[in-house]
Amino acid sequence: MTRSLLIKLLLLSIAASMLAWFPVAQAVLWALLDGAFGGRGGTHLFATLRQTAMIGALALAVLVALRAGCYNLGGEGQMVIGALTAALVGLHLPGPPLLVTLTALAAAMLAGAAWASLAAWLFTGCGVPVLIASLLLNYPARSLCSWLVNGPLRDQDSGLAQTMRLERELWWPALPGTDMNLMVPLVLGLALLVHVGLTRTRAGYRSALLGHSAEFVRFSGMSPARLTLGSMAVSGAIAGLAGALAVFDLHYRYVDDMLTAPLYAWSGIAAVLLVASRPAWVLPAALLLAAIKTSAFGLERKLGLPREAADVLQALIVLAVAGGVWRSNAAQQHDPKGQP
């Protein structure tokens, strides 16, 4: 699969180089590159990296659950619950800034884990598929958070659907010489932890075993329900952490629709599909999708193309790769003589 992906990326690079000979295609290509990585002082590059961090964190959440055979489509709800929890802790917990920040991050992870565990409980206790339960739980999470920031938690001075801003002491400092804070290196570290956890630990092995055969897990003396609950809890904790990172690194408050409008959760799912659930390739896939998203403004500004064209391009890439993976899996299920 890795060799196939490298070949596809190479062919895509060759195709882009050939298109550069045509004036219109060249203009589109340069608009994409400048919109994603250009800008004065690397402004667009830093924006792309921040988008990569958000998409990558949600992709890691999807990956952890998918490795256990759970289709967690509730990352959006788990993320907004975690974000609002982090904002409330940051606003109301007294103490040193470092302690408040760490407590807010931990609370956001617990909130996201609890919301994801509810979907797991609906599956293990009531037989509701995780895919359906997690997807439907997005709606009450979004509605609850929206009601809170439009009502009791609203910043009355601003008149907008948002909480009050965090104290200046809680704002994360920018990395030297950049327009970025700590989100990007934190997500890089998180990706390393997830990769090691899934491929080098006993828990990761059991999770993969559950994803392949719940019956074998049961016959081995382990509890599929407990493993499902654990995998979904970790997945939800990562999604909740992503929401907290957005609060402390991007907005310094919770704003209604700040995490749902950019479609971070759905782009994270697309990133995982793009690399067929390979942990080492999740962040590069997130970078690709983030670059396409960021470049949409360059297309609109320089060429007058609607920014939705970038979403179309992203969908075509995912469909092309997913189609290749499906054909590869179908071919592996048959022997050379065509017998199943």
Image (cartoon, grey):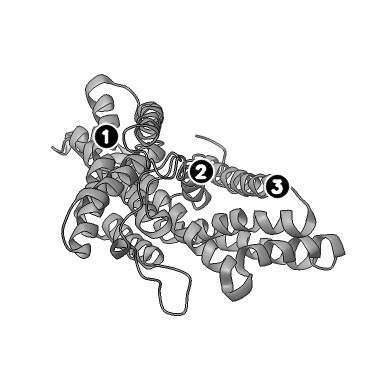
Query: On the rendered structure, is 83 left or right of 304?
Result: left
Q: Nearer the viewer, residue 13 or 58?
A: 58
Query: Callout 1: 10 Å neighbours few (<14), some, many (20+)?
Result: many
Give the mark nearer the N terminus: 2 vs 3. Answer: 2
| Type of amino acid under label 1 | Ala
Residue underneath mark 2: 263
Residue designated by label 1: 214
Q: Residues within 10 Å of mark 3 (few under 14, many from 20)?
A: some
Q: Residue at x 40, y 44 (%)?
A: 157
Residue at (43%, 57%) from the top-left corner? 250
First reached walking from the N terminus: tag 1 or tag 2: 1
Viewer-nearest residue: 159 or 52: 159
Q: State the image coordinates of residue 239 (x, y, percent, origin top left).
A: 34, 47
Count residues near mark 2 (Cα–Cα under 10 Å), then give few for <14, some for 14-19, many for 20+: few
Q: Is residue 22 above or below residue 144?
A: below
Q: Amino acid at mark 3?
A: Ala
Q: Residue furthest left?
A: 221
The percent coordinates of residue 158 (x first, y second) are 44, 45
Camera sees residue 175 = yes
Separation (CA) of disc 1 from disc 3: 42 Å
- Residue placed under numbered mark 3 in the picture: 309
Residue 140 x %, y %: 36, 27
Spot the residue most to the right.
23
Left or right: 251 in relation to 47:
left
Q: Are marks 2 and 3 in contact (CB under 8 Å)?
A: no
Please tell me whether residue 247 is drawn above or below residue 23 in the rendered image. Answer: above
Q: Secondary structure at mark 2?
A: loop
Do labels 1 and 2 touch, CB within 8 Å?
A: no
In-front residue for pair 202/89: 89
- Looking at the picture, which amino acid does disc 2 mark? Leu
